[in-house]
Amino acid sequence: MKKLIAYLEDNKLAQGLLIVLYIVATSLSLYLAQKSVVAFLLLLFSLLLLYYTSFPIRVKWLVGLFVMFVALPFGASGGAAYESYMEVATLVGIYVAMALGLNIVVGFAGLLDLGFVAFFAVGAYTYGIFATGQANNFMPFGEYPLSGESFWIFLLIGLFVAALCGVLLGIPVLRVKGDYLAIVTLGFGEIIRIVFNNLDKPLNITNGAMGLASIQAPEIFGFKLINSSQIYFVVLVILLFVIFAVKRLEYSKIGRSWKAVRENEIAAQAMGIHLVRTKLLAFAVGASFSGLMGVVFAAKQTFVDPTSFTLLESITILVMVILGGMGSVPGVILGAAVMTILNLQVLTELTNWLNQLSLNGVMTIPNALSPSKMQRFIFGGVLILFALYRPQGLIPAKNPKFNEDELKSEAKEKAQTASAKGKAFGA
């Protein structure tokens, strides 16, 4: 086995053939089986295998895009479970984007945020209020609900409104850190939820605990995107934008500033990093991604109410970041995907299977002990195991490695070029 693994590591052609055969086999299995959670999970597992191959980054991206845009929709379309598979994939994309936003705050900047779902709620209600007749209660002009074509504009509006809320949250909490920061952000999240829950009087803006129903679905060129199989592609494109933005920010000047603040605020300030501006920017950028996905969530569900934005949701997103690996972009993506699929599909299917065994008289399991009801217990157990045996997460964060000799030679060449230009200018 060790010889085979060593052979595959050195042979890119063998890796390529193995990946292609694996993707084709799992796609056909999912298509022919019509409903197979195992085949669905195995197809998604191909993305993790692709990550560990030695192909260039561009090749990995091309194959990954093929899997997400072609292989997965094709494989899932073979049976009646098509929409349920696309529903899971869509929610995975939404939670991955949110976890990446929280990773900026927690993983990059080291600011513990327990109220992150508040920005998700802000984005959802920003679109929901104007995409229903609710805005007629307080808007003196305009006709509501707005059409589904306004969804594309509200993606930007939700992003900027959530970023503004992130700044407003950041301003009063800049003087606290650690546990105190967690308590303040937790309070902010609960305040936002309670405000949306009670903002139905004296002026009915959010419809209170009743929520907002019949939200307009996204519309493009007169075609409404109603099903999860259609929303999936919208979420996928937005997710690619979020991943690209986070990767660019990670190694940018501001990304390095966030990491410096995370490691030691005093040392970072001594090096000239503006603490207030850096922290506020982390809150704003992280919140903007959450608000963006809040708009998508409201359009997809066509209904939002305060119960969707509880403290438990914030903790779940934080668990995704911790499980995947704080500060690691691929790790957070994997952690969010694992948590979402475990919650929405694996535990549900396991519960259905055990219920079927109970109905057939094979074995009797109390309803209170069904896996879907033991969800938080299972998540807690997973976290304890990872805290004990893999505290850095599934895919730990890695700092880029530089060749010291190459850097010295490049610096020497630049110095020689500058000297030559200076002599030429002097002549």
Image: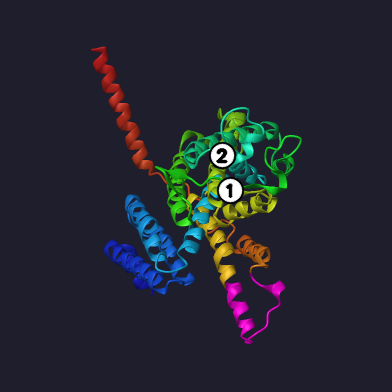
Of mark 1 and mark 2, the one earlier in the sequence is 2
**365 within the magenta span:** yes
**Residue 103 in view:** no
The local secondary structure at tag 2 comes to loop
Query: Which contiguous range is marked in magenta?
Result: 350-371
Q: Please name whichever residue, 195 or 317, is drawn nearer the observer in this view of the structure.
A: 195
In the current view of this chain or complex, which residue is farthest to the right? 202
Indicate whether 119 appears above or below 51. Answer: above
The amino acid at mark 2 is Pro
Up the image or down, 362 lies above or below 245; here it is: below
Residue 264, x across and y down, in percent: 61, 38
- Expressed as whole percent of the image width and height from the top left, the position of residue 312 reads 68, 54
Q: What element does badge 1 sit on?
A: loop
For the point 35% across and 51% down, which residue is it? 57
Is 318 on the left or on the right of 8, as rendered?
right
Q: Position of residue 220 (x, y in %)?
A: 42, 43
Q: Are marks 1 and 2 in contact (CB under 8 Å)?
A: yes
Q: Which mark is residue 145?
A: 2
- Vertical arrangement, residue 389 with respect to residue 56, above or below: below
Q: Residue furthest front?
A: 143
Measured as percent of width and height from the top left, residue 399 is found at 47, 47
Q: Is residue 45 left or right of residue 370?
A: left
Q: Nearer the viewer, residue 261 or 13?
A: 13
Q: CA distance from mark 1 to mark 2?
A: 10 Å
**Which mark, by number, is residue 214?**
1
Where residue 316 sits, quadrant-wise, is: bottom right
Asked if residue 53 lies left or right of residue 374, the reply is left
User: For this rendering, which residue is in front, 229 or 243?
Assistant: 229
Mark number for residue 80?
A: none
User: Looking at the picture, which amino acid does disc 1 mark?
Assistant: Ser
Mark 1, other Cα within 10 Å: few <14 / some 14–19 / many ≥20: some
